[in-house]
Image (spheres, rainbow, N blue to C red):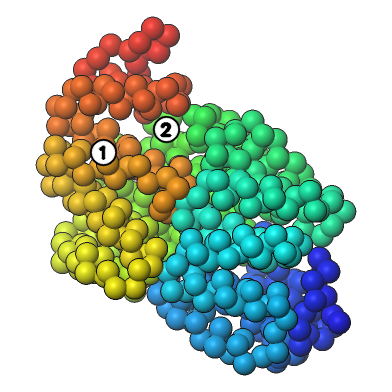
Amino acid sequence: MTTDKQGNSLSGATVEAAEFFDEAVEAFNIYRGDPVALLDNAIKAAPDFAMAHILKAHLFGLATEPDATSEAKAILCKAKTLRLSDREVSHVAALDLVTEGHWTAAATALDRHNARYPHDLVALQSGHLMDFFRASARGLRDRIARVLPKWSPDMPGYSILLGMHAFGLEEAGDYARAEEMGRRAVDLQPLDCWAHHAVAHVMEMQGRAEDGIGWMIAREPHWSGDDNFFKVHNWWHRSLYHLDLGQVDEVFALYDGPIRESRSTLAIDMVDASALLWRLHLSGHDVGERWRELATTWENHADGRTYPFNDWHAVMAYLGTGRQSDVERIVRAYRENRADGSDAAEWGRRTAVPLIEGFVAFWRGDYQAAADHLYGARYIANSFGGSHAQRDIVDWTLTEAAIRGGLTGLAEALANERLALKPHSPVNRTFLARAGVSATPGLKAA
């Protein structure tokens, strides 16, 4: 029986097809190159190669985009006609769940799968991404911790596990271990941009903006190549450091350059663009016509159904261009979508709608209403979407609403909360000064 590099059997594969598959897995691992094209080569060489179809379904199913989700479902229909091993049947079962918006059930199915097949690197990475998209800090940390003892440094893909574990440790607040493991991972595989970004997250969460810029610049050749799927997100991280330091010209240059110059239609890139423009708006800077290009690009992605985190970011662009009807369309879709019982529907109704309402109120200058909506909605960690760094936009908007609305007590409380986590952040120190309060001893307001 033909196997992959980790020793898992591959139903329907030939030696040639398995080589294409291993290359596709490596491309997936480090988010470089074109894994779909490699899988198409594998399928051409061996049309009944089950895992080639299954990995392709993973790639489309995890894209959090309506068209890609439909494509994943079509690929799964084909995969189900093939001869499948128990391991491959288990993959298909998890993918059936995630393509219907049942993210937690799919991640749980892969928990069990990983316990049975600890060397299944595709399942581990796919499960890790499911944990990310459902914002499960514990899942991000513990999924990898459960299998690491089964691996050794000489196994192909070992460094990839270290990079994933580093990100899980960071999201769980274990910053020292996260940085240590992330640095070890990139030492072993310098092109692992996920491990690189785990270290970037540590520096963001600790308010180490200068360190973060240095980390990004020193390793830029490893993460910024044209074939790097994750390059825009890493440019976004660098932008956050510059924004925290008040280096707004640098932020605009990065936005107009590597972040949006290609007019990417990938959801992950548009989320970063929306989030950066919104932060610039919060900071009092006019972003001009940039909202318009972005709002137009969001049109084929924000459907009020597939992934609420994306739709909420689309709303930021819609607000920036006065497209109130699109905002109302998304809110209405989530309020009415109660039938399927999926995580996506629940996230939309319970979390995305209050977030959208809070951002709408903020945009209109109704800061009391914005604060009312966002104060409760900000507690979304471990229930909905993205990383702590991405979700910080909620607390930033809430704090800004409290300051602009003259809610002095709330503004001071929120500024102190932020300073407790990142005491050296110029943005956070300015919040306290603008709240109308003197800085606490040892924390000189900017």
Is the Cβ of the residue at disc 2 closer than 8 Å to that at disc 1? no
> In the image, residue 58 lies at what x, y percent?
58, 72
Mark 1, other Cα within 10 Å: few <14 / some 14–19 / many ≥20: some
In the image, residue 236 above or below residue 127: above
Task: Say what secondary structure mark 2 lies in.
Answer: helix
Q: Is residue 193 above or below residue 311?
A: above
- Kindly identify the residue that appears in the image at 43 percent across and 64 percent down: 267
Identify which residue, 416 or 27, lies in the foreground: 416
* x and y percentages locating residue 298 in the rendered image: 33, 67
Where is the N terminus found, in terms of image quarters? bottom right
Quarter assignment of residue 201 = top right
All told, the count of numbered labels is: 2
Disc on res. 375: 1
Residue at horizontal 81 percent and vertical 53 percent from the top = 151
Left or right: residue 53 versus residue 171 is right
Task: Say which residue appears at 40% left-offset and 53% top-offset.
Answer: 384
Vertical arrangement, residue 177 with respect to residue 166, above or below: above
Which quadrant of the figure has residue 5?
bottom right
Please indicate whether residue 287 sits to the left or right of residue 383 in the image.
left
Decide which of 400, 253 is in the foreground and name it: 400
Residue 203 shows in this picture = yes
Left or right of residue 313: residue 95:
right
- Give the image quarter of residue 128: bottom right
- The residue under the point 32% across, 25% down is 415
* Amino acid at pointer 1: Tyr
What residue sits right under mark 2 in the picture? 244
Crowding at dot 2, Cα within 10 Å, few <14 / some 14-19 / many 20+, comes out as some
